[in-house]
Image (cartoon, grey):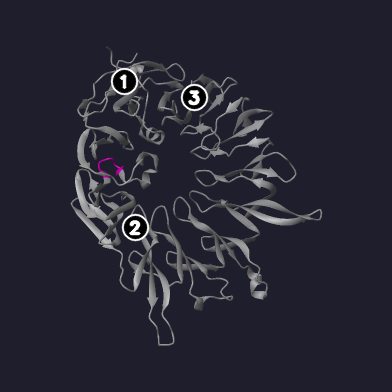
Amino acid sequence: MNPITIAKCTSQAMFALALFAPVLKALGNEAFEIEHRPISFELQGVPTESLLSLDGSRFAVVCKQDDKQTLYLDGKPIRTFDELVSSRLTRIPREFRIWFFSEDNESFAFAIRDGQDQVMIRDSKAGPRYEEIQTPANFLPGTDKLAYRAKKNGQWGFAVDSPGKSIFKTIKQDETRTVIEDSQRMTADAVTHIYAVQASTPAKDQTTPSKRVQIPVVNGVDGPVMQEVKGTLVAPQGGKYLIHAIQLEKDTPLNRAAMNEILFDGKSTWRFRQLKYSPKFSEDGKHWCAAVDTFPAEAKKGKPMMRTHLLMDGKLIGPFDDLADTDITLSPSGGHYAITVLHETKINGSRQKQYFVIHNGKKAGPYKAVFPHVFSPNGERLAYVAKPWDSPKWVAVIDGQPGPEYERIHSPIFSENSKRIAYQVETRNKQAVVVDGRLGDPEEHIFEFNGRTGVFFSPDGKRYAYTAADKSQNVSLIVDGKQRIKTGLRGGWNVRFTENSKHIFIIESRSGGQYLHFNGKQLELGEHKFVAPLHEVLNTITQMPDGGYSLMTWTKSHGEGLQYYNTSIKPKSAMPTK
């Protein structure tokens, strides 16, 4: 039995120091030993929130006592305040948190409510006081600057804080210009600030009334005057941006039938009848697309029949009878696209819907149905699942080539190097995985991951693993399609190969917390075996030079307290002789 005592975090609770080192057999014959060292520090109050840095070397805890909260950073009290600006912060994406570590883990920032004001705290020093601070807020990549949006003297603006210095730029407003708050946008890197103002054009004479117009403002510079600014979108890397707006009537051709327009970096791209689906950028921010309803060339010949088009990097592709937002996919980089389009056609005297996939201009189909497309990480390969027009079953189409038919197929997944691909199939009441076209052994049940195929590739792409259950619901880890390890898993989980592709971590989530497994075996990490939230642990496992691993974990005693640990998993041969 682990001798560690879990201390309750009451008024003057001091955590004890202990050592726990079980021996674990790894994949193959290599043995590992676990060092589980509690970190001793004093807390006052009951912990309510916790956060680990990306590398797992630093941690923050918020404790509540009476009507006040105190933030402890690396075990030391930093500041006592009324409350954090946002709550349940560990459950929302890191980029939208109001407390966070910098990329190099050297600085820490968080926003608090102090009386009637809100303040951004950087490490232990307070910044200016504002009426309100809003997300997203973040350290600017590659700098020591902190950027966020705030409200001061009733006006919104953008704040950029450096150590010992803060710059706040107010959004210009007066009696003729009013900021449209819903249209304000700010990127995490603070390169591009976009908002819209509503203004009145002056009347030219007594018979011509003033007009209410809207103007997009980018980095403090007014854009073209529009009838309405519908929305804005900034590229993931900042800098480039899109604005969806409605033109003024005097500029509208085709009898007000093409009033909508998308501006890319402030320049007009195309006018259309209406925006069907909102624009989206590729992950690298270099390409963009949108679905629009517009008029094909025959509109000029007196046939104004509206059709759906894809607007890709400002070029119109189509027309199509219809396409869905979920069926528009951009590659992470390289400017490749894939869309599923609908065409209605007459077959045997009746109109029927046929689906086609268009990949970089090449058309495949017809299909009865198509699942969303999946690009490989390098953007050069495409895979999707479809139901052929003449079959009741499904096929996986990889690089344009359909595979064998199955009763059901889950969405494919590529390896990180884009060279390998896997997907789950169901046939004859059994399930199996197909890796690089080879069908694996049948299983009673193979677990998915986030609605997709639950196969995990190693970083080098040479290995893969997945989890499966037998009729008695006993879960095993299947490695490389050959090795089967019984795990005892009961909740949901995520599988991750180590950086050197030799070993496997599993983070299991079930009632009472998250549980850590190494090479299929659950680690005894304290009395309650509770570790950091799933997405945190997977980012904080550090590979050590001796071939072992280091991570931060904690145990939790029924919501009453936390005990932090520095946990290391070392090859037994690397352990010092006792």
Residue 207 locus on image (x, y percent): 44, 87
Q: Say above or below: 529 vs 354.
A: above
Q: Identify the mark nearer the N-term, 3 or 1.
A: 1
First of labels 2, 3 by sequence position:
2
Dot 3 alpha-carbon crowd within 10 angstroms: few under 14, some 14 to 19, many 20 or more: few
Q: Residue at x 27, y 25 (%)?
A: 8
Q: Is residue 181 visible?
A: yes
- Magenta stretch: give its range: 100-109
Please state which of residues 64 and 438 is positioned toward the viewer in this rendering.
64
The quadrant where residue 286 appears: bottom left
Q: Position of residue 375 (x, y in %)?
A: 54, 45
Q: CA distance from mark 3 to mark 1?
A: 25 Å
SS class, disc 1: strand
User: Residue at point 69% right, 56% down?
Assistant: 343
Per the rendering, the mark at residue 490 is 3
For the image, the number of numbered tags is 3
Dots 2, 1 in contact, CB < 8 A = no
Q: Residues within 10 Å of mark 1 (few under 14, many from 20)?
A: many
What quarter of the picture does the C terminus occupy? top left
The image quarter containing residue 406 is: top right
Residue 53 drawn above or below residue 311: above
Q: Are marks 2 and 3 in contact (CB under 8 Å)?
A: no
Left or right, 457 with reference to 89: right
Q: State which mark lies toward you, 2 or 3.
A: 3
**Residue 18's x, y, as percent?**
26, 19
Q: In the image, what residue type sits under mark 3? A: Arg
Q: Position of residue 490 (x, y in %)?
A: 49, 24
Which of the two marks, 3 or 1, is nearer to us in this view? 3
Q: Which residue is mark 2?
A: 191
| Left or right: residue 563 compared with residue 205 | left
Name the residue beneath numbered marker 1. 35
